[in-house]
Image (spheres, grey):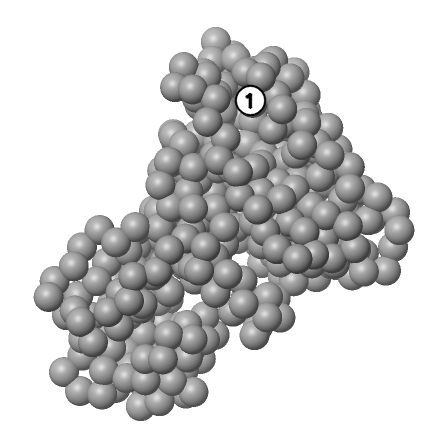
Amino acid sequence: MCCAVIITRTPLRISFAGGGSDFPAVYERGSGAVVATAIDKYMYITVNRKFDEKIRASYSMTEMVDRVDDLKHELIREALRMTGITGGIEITSISDIPSRGTGLGSSSTYTVGLLHALHAFAGRHVGAKRLAEEACEIELGRLDRPIGKQDQYIAAYGGLQFIRFEPDGVLVEPLLPGGEFRRDLEEHLLLLYTGLTRRADSILAEQQRNFEDGAAALSDAARLRDLAIDLRAAILDRRLDTIGEILDAGWKIKRGLASGISSPQIDDWYERARAAGASGGKVVGAGGGGFLLLFAAPRDHARIVERLPELRQIPMHLEPFGSRIIYVEE
């Protein structure tokens, strides 16, 4: 092992359009596309050499085990197996945002950041492509989780990205519309915490079953993919006024992909936001709670927040970088 202590910082993400079309059940029968961005809210993973050969993993609980196979935390167990580290290590993590049930991609962010730290601990430098592919292999392959692939790629690459999912691979295209447009885009985004957390597994599992079994769900996924393509064009053409409309169209489709994605409470919040000036928005992630993302002219933000006193505004900016090693102690 090359280092005594490694710390990685890996960004969380918000998805604008196309979510759902990144499921294998969709793109393996056609193609998928997503527009998403990393944000300046992070997961920090620390790994350090332990004085003995045991493994200590600290998260919401603490495990101390002799063998990788004895770990209960699936992501840590599979990441250690993938990187070939068998012991003599301590792993801890902290997050800027509650790490479960908020829709910001925290599970995949954790996986990417952990892989990055473990590879560095073992003396290997790995790039974004490998980190994303290995995180997908762990979550979708080894653990068979009912999720898509966008979160792993955004966590690894960072930035504002158009990501296309094809049966034979993933293509990542950075969207670089210029600094002034980027600032305007940031200023139009309003991120509100609903206070509702949920386990996304049941929503995502139902969504995946619908994709596998129903032509209607696949048609909806294709429409979401096409909205991502439309959003890519709008960003590159700097057509700011169309972004809210695309988000609104996507949310109306997404609500029908599975039960639990929305609720009367969420629908009420969204309609109140629209009445106060938001041109579009969505619940970020699987749905059911977490964060409500709205698109509105900056002059309308105060009125929207006033109309939604139950929700907490979270300041944020777009993050240009993906997972990074921010500390190394030899």
Q: x, y percentage for residue 13?
A: 47, 43
In this image, 196 relative to 230: left or right?
A: left
| Residue 66 higher or lower than 77, as above or below | below
Image quarter (top left, top right, bottom left or bottom right) of the N terminus:
bottom left
Crowdedness near tag 1: few (<14), some (14–19) or many (≥20) residues, C-alpha within 10 Å: some
Q: Which residue is at a point 24% across and 69% down the rendered structure image?
A: 123
Q: What amino acid is at disc 1? A: Leu
Using the rendered view, name the quadrant where residue 292 is placed.
Answer: top right
In the figure, is residue 126 to the left or right of 89? right
Q: Residue drawn at (32%, 84%), measured in percent from left and top?
A: 86
Most extreme residue toward the bottom is 66
Q: Is residue 255 visible?
A: no
Using the image, determine if residue 56 lies above or below residue 137.
below
Reading the image, the residue beneath label 1 is 236
Identify the image quadrant of the C terminus: bottom left
Q: Secondary structure at mark 1?
A: helix
Q: Position of residue 237 (x, y in %)?
A: 58, 17
47 is higher (above) or lower (below) than 36: below
The residue located at (28%, 67%) in the rendering is 124
- Residue 282 position within the rendered picture, expressed as x and y whole percent measured from the top left: 62, 34
Give the answer, above or below, for where 288 lies relative to 57. Answer: above
The answer, for residue 213, to whether it is visible in the render is yes
Q: Quadrant of residue 316?
A: top left
Quick one: which residue is furthest to the front in this view? 168
State the residue at coordinates (44%, 60%): 130
